[in-house]
Image (cartoon, grey):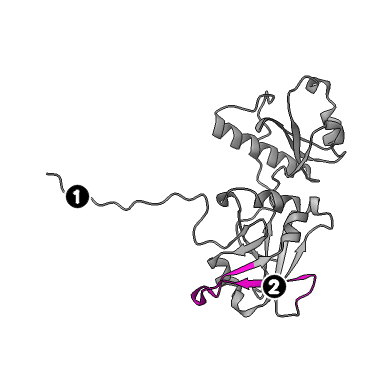
Amino acid sequence: MPKDNWTSWCRSSHFRLGHASVTIHKDGISLNASLNKIVDVAKYQNVRIDLNHPDPDLATKIKCELNNDEEDKNNFKIIRARHIEDKRRGFIACRNLIDSQPKLKKIGQKLRSARRIEVKEYGKDKSSFTFDLQPVCELSVANAADLPAKGGIYRYVDKSEIVYYGRAKNIKLRARDSIRDNWVYDKIEYSLIDSESEQVFWESKFLDEFKTSNNRLPRYNQLSGTSIIKLESRRSDESVI
């Protein structure tokens, strides 16, 4: 009889275990154990939240500053876990922010595995942290005429099937292309992105992900997008806010 050769089995995970992250919910933002250790949430009562753009549709980052100031309309209370051994864990109740920020709202509706966002930037004293808001085609119109005359990435959707991914400096103008007159779709979902290099990056990323999952391109994409480029602004190391 062969000798047993015991081998550990690793669980699969979409996310890097042990890394600081937040999870977006429909009514707020929770901080994972690793993040709680870094910013020592137990020392603070409230969180001030800032977006990096006055227009919520164009915001790409969120900064959270932990503090012990009085709670007010710009200062959200940290809700503690019920069990004392979990006192470091925190939940920021901010439903109005989730409902008002399209990216957060769309992310909050996804499965748990797609609602986690890694935190990579911290303030000098580790009492603040920042996380990115990636485009998720969070805005939507049923008619191409209702698209904004702004830059971004977009996708045509037919009965929940993505049938085209694209990018443009002017989404509305691109949608007027006569070649699309006979396309079948229910809605156009999009994200506003000013930077052309960011548009190229995300169009290519979404196309590559679609092709990997479906072994083909979307129905109306005849050619794959521009190869993914490495953006200098996307660093994996911790940065100071």
Secondary structure of the residue carrying tag 1 is loop
| Above or below for 186 versus 205 | above
User: Where is residue 205 shown, x and y percent of the image?
Assistant: 64, 39
User: Mark 1: few, some, or many residues within 10 Å (few <14, many ≥20)?
Assistant: few
Which numbered dot is residue 73? none
Q: Amino acid at mark 2?
A: Lys
Q: Nearer the viewer, mark 2 or mark 1?
A: 2
Residue 206 in the figure: left or right of residue 53: left
| Total number of numbered discs in the rendering | 2
The C terminus lies in quadrant = bottom right
The N terminus lies in quadrant = top left
User: Where is residue 152 shown, x and y percent of the image?
Assistant: 78, 41
| Above or below for 1 versus 49 | above
**Alpha carbon separation for disc pair 2 and 1:** 54 Å
Magenta residues (range): 71-91
Residue 23 in the figure: left or right of residue 58: left
Q: Nearer the viewer, residue 86 or 68?
A: 86
Q: Amino acid at mark 1?
A: Asp
| Above or below for 95 versus 172 | below
Which numbered dot is residue 4? 1
Direction left: furthest residue: 1
75 drawn magenta: yes
Direction front: furthest residue: 82
Residue 116 in the figure: left or right of residue 164: left
| Image quarter of residue 68 | bottom right
46 drawn magenta: no
| Image quarter of residue 140 | top right
Which numbered dot is residue 77? 2
Secondary structure of the residue carrying tag 2 is strand
Residue, x 73% and y 23% (percent of image)?
A: 184
